[in-house]
Image (tube, helix red, strand yellow):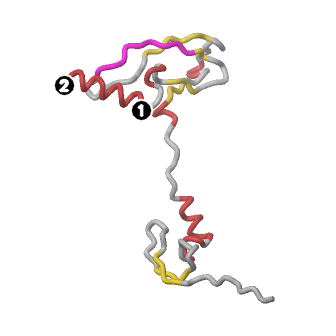
Amino acid sequence: MNIAKQTRKMSMKECDFIGCTNIFEGSQFEKYCKDPRCIETRLAQRKTREKKKDLDTENLILKHDIYGIRIPSRKMLNLRCRARTHNGVRCSEIFSVLYEKNREIYPKYCTNHRNTHQRNRFERGLLEHAIA
């Protein structure tokens, strides 16, 4: 008994890869032409990815033994929050951080403004109060 094999229907398609406008002949399951699928294109795409943010933008970097001054290995520091609005109004909260020997990266903002979403809400909130 012969069973007929399913044949793929080939048609002309436009490549769905971002920035590629090639038209290729492909089956109903293919989305991309041969250019985006080749290794050179994928390697070039990996090189153009966005680089990670600098640590200085979100964190406070305190180095030990700077300028020959030794700081105790563990000490509680009271830091002032650095969140600001466009008008220059600052958050007045003071938060404490444990200063440790083998650590250099510490939070720059208080717990209310740790992520960018919360800082943006803080800016918008003060602007809305100024307008009202």
Out of 94 and 117, give the one closest to the viewer. 117
From the viewer's perspective, tell me whether residue 1 is left or right of residue 90. Answer: right
When asked about the image quadrant of residue 122, the answer is: top left
Q: Secondary structure at mark 1?
A: helix
Give the quarter of the figure containing the N terminus.
Answer: bottom right
Q: Secondary structure at mark 2?
A: helix
Q: Residue 97's x, y, as percent?
A: 55, 15
- Which residue bears the numbered disc 2? 131
Look at label 1 and name its amino acid.
Answer: His
Residue located 57% across and 79% down the image: 27
Q: Which residues are magenta?
A: 89-97
Dot 1 or dot 2: first in sequence order is: 1
Q: Residue 9's x, y, as percent?
A: 57, 83
Q: Residue 127's x, y, as percent?
A: 25, 26
Out of 102 and 125, give the one closest to the viewer. 125
Residue located 38% across and 24% down the image: 83
- Which residue bears the numbered disc 1? 117
